[in-house]
Amino acid sequence: MSSKTILLTLSILTVLAWVHARGNIMLGNPMGVPKIHHDVHEKYGFPFIKREEDVYVQCYKNEIIRAIVVQDLEGDGESYVKRGGIGRKNVTIKLKGPRGGGYRFLVDVYAL
Ligand SMILES: *[C@@H]1O[C@H](CO)[C@@H](O)[C@H](O)[C@H]1NC(C)=O
């Protein structure tokens, strides 16, 4: 294999890894922190339509969000923190499916 081929292969793998990771979130450290939200959020796909939702999670009284873990169970969705997050009392997480497809995300939020 020439070095050009190796470089090309590496960039393709990097792009694939990046695309694959678009649906996952791993923020903060969940070790030893109680879960305040643990739920599968899913929607069916419709032709030509992009399904999406905002997941809102709020802490009780004095808790602060320590970690946010989102797993894209179908692997072709997108997710990101829209508002709030680590160190705050609430978070809004955006979940999106691919155009024409549904989605399934496992959302875990940890707070103490
Ligand atoms: C989320 O928390 C912030 C403070 O961190 C607060 O100002 C805001 O009103 C909260 N949002 C909602 C919808 O409760």
Image (cartoon, helix red, strand yellow):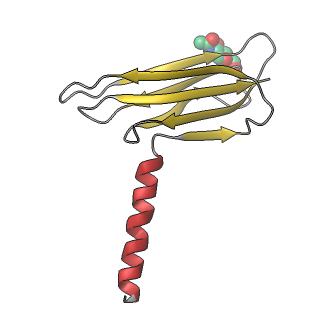
User: In the figure, 80 relative to 57: above or below?
Assistant: below
What is the quadrant of residue 74 in the picture? top left
Q: How many marks?
A: 0
Q: Of 112 and 91, which appears nearest the observer? A: 112
In the shown orientation, is residue 72 left or right of residue 2? Answer: right
Residue at the image position 55 percent from the left and 17 percent from the top: 56
For ligand 1, the image quadrant comes to top right
Question: Relative to 33, is 8 on the left or the right?
Answer: left
The residue sitting at 42% across, 65% down in the picture is 13
Kindly identify the residue that appears in the image at 46 percent across and 40 percent down: 23
Question: x and y percent of residue 36 in the render?
Answer: 69, 19
* Residue 2 placement, left or right of 68: left
Residue 88 image position (x, y, % from top left): 71, 25
- Which residue ends up furthest to the bottom in the rendered image? 2
For this orientation, the residue located farthest to the left is 47
The C terminus - image quarter: top right
Across and down, in percent, residue 107 comes to 55, 27
Q: Is residue 36 left or right of residue 98?
A: right
